[in-house]
Image (cartoon, helix red, strand yellow):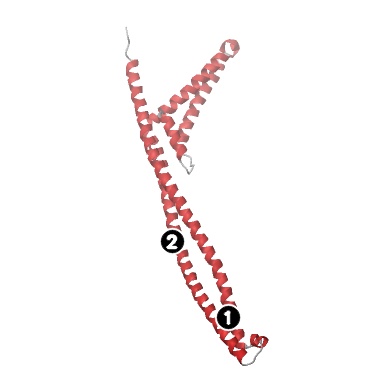
Amino acid sequence: MQNGITRLYNAIWYTQVGRALEQKDLDKENAENTQDLFAEELNNRENIQPSKRGHSLLSKSEVLHDSKVNSKTSGIVTQKILIDNLDAVRQVFEDIINDKRNNIQRYKQAIGHLIALVEQKKNSLKSIIDDLDKLEQMKMAVTAESKNISLELKESGLSDSEIEQHPDYARCINSFNDFDSTVNEKNVRVDELEQDIERAKQDIEYHKSNITQLHRDVEKIKTEQSEAIADLITAREKGKINEVLSDIKVE
């Protein structure tokens, strides 16, 4: 079973913002300070009776032993720091939970903006499609008009080249070309809007999945918080029991 320290470090790992937590830094600093105290003690032992260096220096085995004690003691000190600062440990978890909740709110805001953007683009798309319908109708009307003009001019005895140069017929042809060019431009815009809408919908689904995952993370960290605090409280109570038992002398 994971102990309180492991659960704490795991919870810190879960955070997505990656910000440095002051409590974690404090624990690390205290552990390093403990190591510095041991190093200072070793130096003091080396400085005892400099004229008898052979008796005052630590042997290799002693140094290795002190290193093991140093490492073990650092872990004990770190756990003791956590046990003595349960509120600080609890706050570490709360900070991580709040970070994730803030991220949830950011995703919800992003989704809100995307939904508004989708509606705006849908309205633009509808307006353009309505314009396209009108343009197609105008193209059909001007095409019919050009055919009627061409037929009347041909009946009046004009040649095909003369008909093409006739102002009324040329006006119809120019109008048709203008309408057709506008239709092509609007069709390009329709494609762009449809792609934008599809991308926005995909982003909305992506953000929704992130929100779901963040909710899972929050619940998981809440569980880790409860278990970590319980582990540390158990360790504290065991420490009290050991202190009581240490005073009992067996004759």
Q: Which residue is mark 1?
A: 175
**Compared with residue 185, is residue 70 higher up or lower down, i.e. above or below?**
above
Give me the residue at 58% from left, 79% from top: 176
Residue 183: assigned label: none
Label 1 crowd (10 A; few <14 / some 14-19 / many >=20): some
**Nearest the camera: 34 or 109?**
109
- Does any portion of residue 57 appear in the rendered image? no
Three-letter residue code for mark 1: Ser
Residue 227 picture location, percent across and down: 37, 32
Label 2 crowd (10 A; few <14 / some 14-19 / many >=20): few
Give me the residue at 60% from left, 81% from top: 173
**Nearest the camera: 198 or 81?**
198
**Nearest the camera: 170 or 211?**
170
- Residue 92 appears in which quarter of the rendering? top left
Query: Horizontally, is 94 left or right of 41 in the view?
Result: left
Q: Earlier in the sequence, mark 2 or mark 1?
A: 2
Quadrant holding the N terminus? top left
Query: Horizontally, is 101 left or right of 153 in the view?
Result: left
Three-letter residue code for mark 2: Ala
Give me the residue at 44% from left, 28% from top: 78
Q: Which residue is mark 2?
A: 116
Query: Horizontally, is 24 left or right of 170 in the view?
Result: left
**Nearest the camera: 77 or 199?**
199
